[in-house]
Amino acid sequence: PHHRHPSPPWDESWPQTWSACLAGVNLVSCEALTCPVASHSRNSASLCRSRLCFQFLGYNPGSEKIEVLRRLGYRRRIARKNSDELSPDHHSLLPLTQATPRARKAEKQAKKVNNMSQFRSEEMLYVQMFIQNDAAHDTLHELGAIGAIQFKDLNKDKSAFQKMFVQDVRKCEDMLRIIRYLKSEMESEKMMSRTSGVPVPKLSSLNELHDRLQELEKEMKEHSTSYKQLLAQRKELSEHLQVLRNASKWFGQANRSGVSFTAPTAGGDEDVGRGAGEMSALLEEGEQSRRPPSMLGHIAGCIPTHNVKDFAVTLFRATRGNMHLKHEELEEVKGMSGEENELKSVFIVYFSGERSRQKIDKICEAFAATKYSLPDTAAGQERTVQEVNERMKDLEIVVARTETYRRQKLSSVVEMVEEWEEQVEREKGVCHTLNKFNYDVSMKALIAEGWCAESAMDDVRRALRAGTLKSGATVQTVLNVLKTREAPPTYFKSSKVTAGFQAIVDAYGMARYQEFNPAVFTFITFPFLFGVMFGDIGHGIMMTMAGGLIILFEKQLKAAAANDMFGTIYDGRYNIFMMGLFATYAGFIYNELFSVPLEALGSTMWCSGEMDDPSCLNIPGINASTSLQKWIRTNINEAYDFKTQQSTGVEVSWDIYPMGQDPGWSHTANKLNSANSFKMKFAIVIGVVQMVAGVCCKLMNSLYFKDSLTLYFVYIPEMVFINSIFGYLVLLIIFKWTTNWDATYVLNNEEVVHIPQVYCKDDLSNVPCWTAPFVGTRAALPIYGSKLAALPEHMWCMAAGAPTAGCAVFEWQGKMIVESNTYGNATYFKEEAFNSELCATNAEHCMLYKQSPPSLLDTLIKMFMEPGFVGINNQLIPGQGSLQGFLILIAFISVPTLLLPKPLIMNARHKARRPQGGNYGTVGEMPTMADDGGSVASDAGHHGHGEEFDFGEEMVHQMIHTIEYVLGCISNTASYLRLWALSLAHAQLSEVFWEKTVVEIGLESASPLMLFVTVTAWSCFTFGVLMGMESLSAFLHALRLHWVEFMNKFYHGDGYKFMPFSFDAKDED
């Protein structure tokens, strides 16, 4: 529909000013100006900017007042619902300055999506674009710069040779090949490619850059070939020169002593003398004529050193020993830079006869020996040496100039190579993307389709406008939003802080579109679980510092991240930092600093005879010099006045360590029992809480996708089952932790009562209370002792000669009952002897004793073996037996509820839809995860749209899910015990390294040198084993707990990642 809006103020001089602007201003000069989208200014500068806007929008400004007015203050808008504002087919106008109610609503929704983008993926739109051929290249350059659209390949049915821009792609690949060649040449010359900071002038076309690179490659290859030939000639001359020098030396030796053949002859010394005579004749300087055929011959040259031994053996066998070989290893000969020079040896072979010469020539060829000419006379050798030296000097000059020219040529482009490579990579990406487009012959335009985030639509529109303006095209790009049944890609906006944790989730599987993102919880839970297994203050601080240093110098270390191993650490720098923080936090819970107990936050609750703490020594009833056991630090002096033997009415409390495990447990015989009890229960609590959180994520998915089947018949049964058993176990653990077992008593084997440790007044008016502390017998009690004297003998908790902090007194139906000592007397636990019914008639059958903390394992087993019954000694909460029976009942009911209703309801819905229209759906309808009765969103979501519903398959799938969930709750809870196991292993290893190296060897040796050695060894063990291997082990176990125990409760992970066309993603294909 067309909208009417008030016109902006009008001035009669505008048409003249507009005409002057159009006539006097060049479009090129306006390129730097911006479009005044919300301006109605009357000055000419605003009109000149407007001219650029109208050129950009494809208008041809006229002189009519209404046209100037409309184009200055209004923009075109598509009347169709899902089309872009640039389509030329519709001409309804909306002012740029006015926001419609629909636009305001869309803006609010976009802000809401951006705020929740970490919880769910971005809203995606399927877009279609009609791009003019002339504007396609520049438009894609603009889109690649923002990286907002993932294009769909519309030419999958075509081969690579049938696509329009395949030649351009090949051309880009050829240019990249040439650039790689140039970079390799630079590396061989120790010239690293770099950027100077000055922008490289862009070439006018891809062909121009291709031609320049081809010319450069051809020239460099020609020079490289010539350069290699010159170096080979220099190497040959150098070898020839050394052959001449060694031969001259060997001839001199032969002249003085003659030549001895390798194998002796029958003539003995006479033959040796003849050989010496022949050699003397051979070396005679005045000899001008050629030697007679009977004289010795020689062959000289160079041979690889590793072939010398085989060469000598072959010569001896071929000539039957009638030869003499001398060889010497050459000095290193300069060759091609970057090449590894082969070690060679100079040799000379003396022989007799032409037949031997032929054999030796063939052997030299076989062993890659290079032969060089060697004059017979000393004068000839001298002349040859001079000639070789002169040629060597000339060749050195040529080599130096060639090398200088080569380096200059490479230096001229060393600052351009990186820019060229980036330009060509972008061009290749553009051409590769253009191959995905369809070509419309009738419209002479390219048709593109793809996915785009709704929040990026404004950026896409701006990029399309900029691409059209840059190309000078006359027709604007048309952008339409289409509806499709294809599943959209998943796109989470993540920062550098959260990217590492998002990568952990994505490694398991990409989330479905709009599925809840587990990375929101993983950001906290992953480092926390790691810290539980790696808890130590010292080790946590070390890891935090390592991650903090990488974060602090992340810009300087970014280049080193190209290495795969360090790149993994660099990408996870925030993960390491967070894991270190939580490991430090867990270390404070365990109170361990490199396995050494830390008493930094206060005094331990436990006192011992070794302490000289006044608060420990002033506790009455304790003799610190003779006590062999630790005792508890309390405020008993405030609760009872020992001078007047009067109660103050204050309850006795323990001075508990303010945070974490009390360090007083260290160096005790039962410290492992205490630590294991806490860590095991702590692991179960963490595991059940995380699994319940995973099931709650299924609730969020069900509510978001309005999947009522999954909500009522999957989420609720799963939540009921896990909480009725394991959630109940967690509550028992918390009750056991928070209950004061020093003040919890069993009355008449039927009831659990709480008696605070407040001492009785003289008139027993504050019952329930405790008797006076450290009084051995009832007769010795203060004034109220006479009131308790008539009670049965078993009503006293103190053994003879072992006074304690008092016995509890409780009043029941007007009768006073005092705590009994049940140690070693099982009769007191029999209900038939001590119960309320008998106690009402006779005090002898009354019983009050302190309840021991029940075993939770026994409680959980008996919950199934004896449903509805809990013994009084194992009771934690009133009515526990009935509660357990109810929980077992609803747990069993939840299993068939999880199994049957959903497939049956889906089958009923399927049958109800069949008479109406079969399996046909609405054309163009966008699918959601809640379609098809929730089968897509639920765990039975393997049925896609368009597939025929199969009740049997759905039933089997739901049965598998039910069995997997029920058994998984048990196995997954047990799996979380790895938190306890890894924590125990880490603490024990740390303690062993410290005790066995530093304490038992270093400190006990009293030697500074030995202490230094042991501390060094301990540091190596700490870094290598604990910080290296143990941290990796804890990381992998935390990874498994998230992937298997947490994410399988709700996460499908069968989506696909949003991979837009972007110039920033260079490593992606």
Image: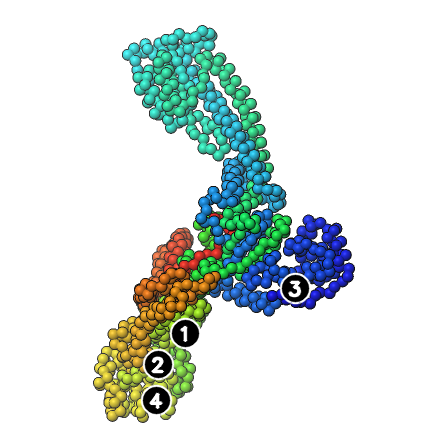
Q: In the rendered image of this protein, does residue 175 appear above or below residue 698?
A: above
Say whether disc 4 or disc 3 marks the residue closer to the N-terminus: 3
> On the image, which quarter does residue 702 sit in?
bottom left
Residue located beneath label 4 in the image: 782
Q: Residue 838 or 235: which is nearer the viewer?
A: 235
Which numbered disc, 2 or 1, marks the residue closer to the eye? 2
Q: In the rendered image of this protein, does residue 415 appear above or below residue 586?
A: above
Residue located beneath label 1 in the image: 656
Q: Amino acid at mark 3?
A: Pro
Residue located beneath label 3 in the image: 95
Q: Which percent across, then down, holds residue 232? A: 48, 26
Contact between marks 4 and 1 (CB within 8 A): the answer is no
Say whether disc 4 or disc 1 marks the residue closer to the N-terminus: 1
Residue that appears at 37% across and 85% down: 759
Say whether disc 2 or disc 1 marks the residue closer to the N-terminus: 1
Contact between marks 3 and 2 (CB within 8 A): the answer is no
Q: CA distance from mark 4 to mark 1?
A: 31 Å
Q: Amino acid at mark 4?
A: Pro
